[in-house]
Amino acid sequence: MPTRYSAVYHQDLAGRIPPGSLVHVEDHDGAWSDIYLHPDHAELELVHDLNWLSRHQIGSGLWQQDWTHDGRMQEPLENLGVAVSAWEIVSPRRMPSIRSVVPIDQEGSCIWIIREGACTRELCAAMNAILQRIAGDGLWLQYWYPRNGGTRCGVTPVPSGIPALV
C-alpha cells in the first residue's frame, strides 16, 4: 500500500488500458494513482525514471490528489486552468545521458522533458490530454511550501500556454 501520496507508472502488460487508448489512469482513495502506459509506446527506462521522480514530487507532497468524488478522473475536461503539466519530447543531445525524463517544476506548472525515443509522439499527446485534466482541472494540486507558506498553487488560473524548452 502506498504511503501518504503516490503515483505509480506501469508498462501495461496486464491489459488495463481500454482498447484504442495508450494511457489509463486509476485514481484511488487515499491519495494514490496507478498510471498505465502502453508497452509498445513507452520504454521501460521511462517508466522507471517517471517512478523515481514521482516518489519525490508526490511522495513529498509537492503534488497532492484533490478531488470531490470517485470517478471524477473519467469525467470530461472542464478547462479550469488551475495548473499546467505536460510532456515535451526533445532530442537526446539536449538530455542528460543517464535520464529519459527531466521535470521542470515551477510554481503553477510542471513540464516533463522526455528524451526522444523513450516514448512515441502518440503516447506523449495522449498523456498531455490526461495531464490537462489532472493538473488543469485541479484533480492533483501543486504545493510550494517554502515560498508561499504552504498554500496551493493554482488558486487562480495560470497563464495559458505551456512553457517550451525548445
Image (spheres, grey):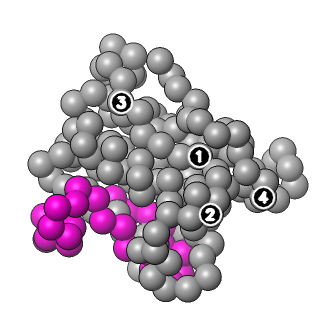
Q: Label 1's element?
A: strand
- The answer to which of marks 1 and 2 sits earlier in the sequence is 1
- Judged from this view, the residue extending furthest toward the right is 149
User: From mark 4 to mark 3, how far is it between C-alphas?
Assistant: 29 Å
User: From mark 2 to mark 4, how far is it between C-alphas?
Assistant: 9 Å
Q: Label 2's element?
A: loop
- The residue carrying mark 3 is 89
- The residue carrying mark 2 is 138
Q: Residues within 10 Å of mark 1 (few under 14, many from 20)?
A: many
Residue closer to the observer: 79 or 15: 79
Quadrant position of residue 42: top left
- The answer to which of marks 3 and 1 sits earlier in the sequence is 1
- The residue carrying mark 1 is 84
Task: Look at label 2 and name its amino acid.
Answer: Gly
Q: Label 3's element?
A: strand
- The residue carrying mark 4 is 155
Task: Look at label 4 and name its amino acid.
Answer: Val
Q: Residue at point 58% right, 58% down?
A: 79
Magenta stretch in the rendered image = 6-32
User: From mark 1 to mark 2, how far is it between C-alphas?
Assistant: 10 Å
- The answer to which of marks 4 and 3 sits earlier in the sequence is 3
At which x and y percent is residue 155? 78, 58
Task: Look at label 3 and name its amino acid.
Answer: Ile
- Judged from this view, the residue extending furthest toward the top is 93
- The answer to which of marks 1 and 4 sits earlier in the sequence is 1
Q: Is residue 3 visible?
A: no
